[in-house]
C-alpha cells in the first residue's frame, strides 16, 4: 500500500493513464496526476537556475527600483511582456521572441526571463529550455570529449528545435569566429523554422560583437524590451548588509543592558 507521502500515484501507479470501461470497451484516460507529472518534466527539461522556478510576471517587484524613471521603464517592460504572453499563440506562429536589454548588470533581466519561462510552461503548454550563452558554448565544447553521449550535431539540433529557447546573458562571451559560427547555426535554424528565442543581454543589439548575419536575424525575430539602468541586485545587497548591521548593533545594545 502506498504511503501518503509517496511520489507514485496510488491511482495509476505511475502510468499516468487509467483504464476504464466505456460502452463496453476498455479505454485509457489521463489520470489526475498526469498534468502535474508533465509540468514536473517540463521544469526538469527547462533547467531554470535554482531560486527562479517560482517567479511569475504578477510577482515582479517594480518597487524594488529606487528612481521613478527606472520604475516607469520597468512598468512599460512588464506591459510589453504581459501583452506578449497574451498574444503568445500568434507570436509562436510567427517565431517572434524577445530581446530584453539593459546595460546595467543585476537590473532584473534574468528574473523576468525566468518569469516568462514559468508562464509559458504553466499557462501555454509550451516546452522551454533556459541557458546562458556561456553554458551553451561550454556544452558544445564538452561534446568533443570522448565518452560524452551527445555529439555536437545532436546538441546543436536540440538547441535549434526546442519550442522556446531562452539565452541569458547573450553577448558576455568572447566572440571568436568559432563562437560566431555556432551561434549563427543555432539562431539561423531557429529563424528559418520560426522557433521562439528569448534573449537577455547587457548589450543593445547594434552593439553586439556579432556580424550582420546574426544581429539582423535577432532584430527580425524579436521584440525589443528595454529594462531599467539600475541594479536591483545592488539594492538587495545593501538591504541585506543593513539588516545584518541592525542585528549586530541590536545585539550589542542587548549585551550592554545585561
Image (cartoon, rainbow, N blue to C red):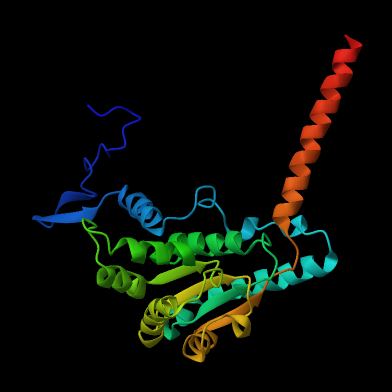
Q: Image height check: is 243 above or below 178?
A: above
Count the marks: 0
Q: Image height check: is 21 above or below 14?
A: below
Q: Quadrant of residue 28?
A: bottom left
Relative to 153, is 177 on the left or the right?
Answer: right
Residue 2 on image: x %, y %: 25, 29
Q: Image height check: is 240 above or below 59?
A: above
Residue 181 on image: x %, y %: 39, 81
Name the residue nearer the viewer: 125 or 184. 184
Residue 196 on image: x %, y %: 44, 77
Residue 132 appears in the picture as rendered? no
Which residue is most to the top?
A: 258
Q: Quadrant of the C terminus?
A: top right
Q: Quadrant of the N terminus?
A: top left
The structure residue drawn at horizontal position 41% and vertical position 82%, both measured from the top left corner, is 184
Q: Quadrant of residue 158?
A: bottom left
Amino acid at each position: 500500500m502506498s504511503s501518503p507521502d509517496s511520489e507514485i500515484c496510488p491511482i495509476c501507479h505511475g502510468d499516468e493513464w487509467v483504464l476504464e470501461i466505456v460502452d463496453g470497451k476498455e479505454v485509457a484516460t489521463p489520470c489526475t496526476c498526469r498534468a502535474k507529472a508533465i509540468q514536473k518534466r517540463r521544469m526538469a527539461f527547462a533547467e531554470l537556475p535554482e531560486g527562479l522556478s517560482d517567479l511569475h510576471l504578477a510577482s515582479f517587484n517594480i518597487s524594488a527600483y529606487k528612481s521613478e524613471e527606472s520604475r516607469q521603464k520597468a512598468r512599460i517592460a512588464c506591459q510589453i511582456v504581459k501583452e506578449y504572453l497574451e498574444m503568445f499563440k500568434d507570436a509562436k506562429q510567427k517565431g517572434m521572441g524577445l530581446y530584453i536589454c539593459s546595460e546595467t548588470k543585476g537590473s532584473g533581466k534574468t528574473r523576468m526571463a525566468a518569469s516568462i519561462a514559468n508562464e509559458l510552461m504553466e499557462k501555454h503548454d509550451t516546452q522551454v529550455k533556459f541557458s546562458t550563452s556561456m553554458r551553451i558554448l561550454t556544452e558544445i565544447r564538452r561534446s568533443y570529449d570522448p565518452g560524452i553521449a551527445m555529439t555536437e550535431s545532436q546538441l546543436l539540433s536540440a538547441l535549434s528545435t526546442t519550442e522556446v529557447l531562452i539565452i541569458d546573458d547573450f553577448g558576455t562571451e568572447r566572440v571568436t569566429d568559432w563562437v560566431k559560427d555556432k551561434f549563427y547555426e543555432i539562431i539561423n535554424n531557429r529563424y528559418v523554422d520560426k522557433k521562439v528565442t528569448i534573449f537577455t543581454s547587457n548589450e543593445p543589439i547594434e552593439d553586439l560583437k556579432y556580424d550582420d548575419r546574426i544581429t539582423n536575424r535577432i532584430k527580425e525575430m524579436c521584440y525589443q524590451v528595454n529594462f531599467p539602468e539600475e541594479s536591483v541586485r545592488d539594492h538587495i545587497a545593501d538591504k541585506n548588509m543593513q539588516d545584518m548591521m541592525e542585528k549586530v548593533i541590536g545585539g550589542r545594545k542587548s549585551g550592554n543592558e545585561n
